[in-house]
Image (tube, rainbow, N blue to C red):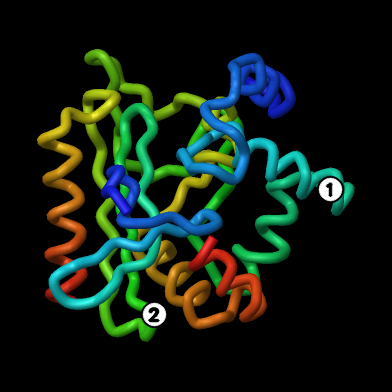
Amino acid sequence: MWAPRPLADIGLSHPPLFKPGTHWSYSNTNYVLLGLIVEAVTNDRLGNELVKRIIHPIGLHDTTFATGRQVAAPAAHGYYQGKDITALSGSYAWAAGAIVSTASDLDRFYRALLTGKVVPAAQLKAMESA
Amino acid sequence: MTNTGLGDSYGLGLLRETTSCDAGWGHNGLVPGYASWALTSKDGRHSAIVLTNVRTFPLSPNLGAALADLAMTAFCDS
């Protein structure tokens, strides 16, 4: 099991890939930092805020923030190096990838996001253009 | 912009993929054991979600490209 702060520390122990604002590169660490910011601003756990602000209002009935050692059954089995790793804790990814969901819930989420039902118009525009 | 494998361009947590029919917005995902693609058009006319279990991490370039092609084909057929 991993805690968010050590994950961020590992990422930040590496030198930056480029000067800020000059390029972009996908970064799990940046999502972990965003999750820590959510917790600092709301004074609440990220999982609770996801349920309160996104999962419940949109009606994602089969979506969980799975940072424990088990995923809600039934789940497709995943494999790595010949081993069944379905029960691998999502804590190593945390805000960058611990959400367990279904195809219909993902469809519902992206339709809601892109039609302005998740964040206000100005923020959606920023998401689409930054 | 060069296609980096994360769509044609990337905003704040949202990628855009140019397809043969319309721009698809969403994200892909890869963790050990699982891979995902989500593409939805702005007007909601097209939407495709591809979720699969996998047995290699990272994906081979061929498998990664095949999953992206599958998502884009399903997106335009939807």
Q: Which residue is rendered at x = 74% and y = 55% of the image?
A: A49
Quadrant that contains the N terminus of chain A: top right
Is B75 positioned to the left or the right of A12 in the image? Answer: left
Image mark for residue B60: none
Q: Chain of mark 2?
A: B
Residue B26 falls in which quadrant of the image? Answer: bottom left
Foreground of the two, B40 or B9: B9
Name the spot of residue A66 as percent of width and height, x first.
56, 40
Name the spot of residue A118 as percent of width and height, x first.
61, 73
Residue A37 falls in which quadrant of the image? Answer: top right
Image mark for residue B42: 2
Disc 2 marks a residue whose amino acid type is Lys
Q: Which residue is rendered at x = 26% and y = 66% of the image?
A: B48
Quadrant that contains the C terminus of chain A: bottom right
Label 2 CA crowd tier, 10 Å (few <14, some 14–19, many 20+): some
Is A19 positioned to the left or the right of A75 in the image? Answer: right
Foreground of the two, B19 or A46: B19
Is A38 positioned to the left or the right of A108 in the image? Answer: right
In the image, residue B52 above or below residue A59: above
Foreground of the two, A129 or A22: A22
Q: Which residue is mark 1?
A: A44
Mark 2 lies on a secondary structure that is loop
Name the spot of residue A117 as percent of width and height, x first.
58, 79
Cα separation between marks 1 and 2? 32 Å
